[in-house]
Image: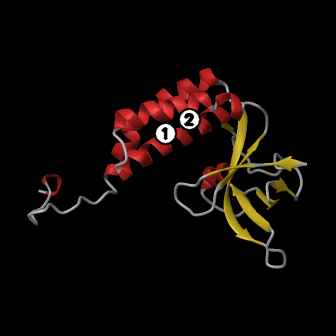
Amino acid sequence: MFKVEFTRSVKGKHPIARFRLNREECNTYCYVGCGRKDNNITYYGCNQCKGVDRNAKGCKQIHLNGTVIVNGDPSIGHKEGCKALRTAVVHAEDYKRRASKEVRVGTTTIGNARLHNHSLMLATCDEADVDETETRKSWVLKSLNSRLNKNKVMRVASITETGDLPQELK
């Protein structure tokens, strides 16, 4: 019996399914749909297969009933060139995503979000069965500031109280 764990999705309303191949590697799957006859079955497609050539056809699909995979071994049937992700990298990216969301919403500053989520990430390494040293390296690899700068382009500045254009739009 193969099981997955779920993490919150940034873009969609359905969670991301994560299947661990071993302690160091995992594949992530995004929601595709649910069964027509049986609404308990949900279909998820491999994100790494989609990353090979951006064609959804031919990517590995898993069928889930809750957290249990019901259609066989999820490590077999991927596209050629599909590479599993490092579990520590996925763990670190999840907490960086949380930190950048807290800053974008305005609930905290960049420094506080970085410290708070970094400590949470390290505290949950044992629980998530992830290598703490590799997770620390992954946290430094792509900084929180670069993630926020990338998202700055997508934000729309709010109008000032006097009705003038904000400084960043002039």
* Callout 1 crowding tier (Cα within 10 Å): few <14, some 14–19, many ≥20: many
Look at the picture and state if 37 lies above or below 163: below
Q: Amino acid at mark 2?
A: Ala
Dot 2: few (<14), some (14–19), or many (≥20) neighbours within 10 Å? many
Q: Position of residue 114 (x, y in %)?
A: 42, 33
Amino acid beneath label 1: Lys
Q: Residue furthest top?
A: 133
- Residue at the location (82% across, 50% down)? 74
> In terms of secondary structure, where does tag 2 sit?
helix
Q: Quadrant of the C terminus?
A: bottom left
Please, is residue 14 above or below residue 1 in the view?
below
Query: Can I make out residue 143 in this image?
Result: no
Locate residue 128 relative to residue 9 in the image: left or right.
right
2 and 1 marks in contact (CB < 8 Å): yes
Residue 137 image-quadrant placement: top right
Specify whether 170 is left or right of 109: left
Residue occupying image coordinates x 67% and y 35%: 87
- Could one spot residue 71 in this view of the protein? yes
Q: Which residue lies under the disc numbered 2?
A: 92
Q: Quadrant of residue 43?
A: bottom right
Q: Residue at x 72, y 40 (%)?
A: 26
147 or 56: which is nearer to us? 147
x, y percent for residue 136: 55, 24
Decide: is 158 above or below 95.
Answer: below
| Local secondary structure at mark 1 | helix
Q: How is the image coloured?
A: secondary structure
- Residue 106 placed where, x, y %? 34, 49
Alpha carbon of mark 2 to alpha carbon of mark 1: how far? 6 Å
State the count of labels: 2
Q: Which residue is mark 1?
A: 96
Q: Residue furthest bottom?
A: 37
Question: In the rendered image, which quarter is residue 82 located in?
Answer: top right
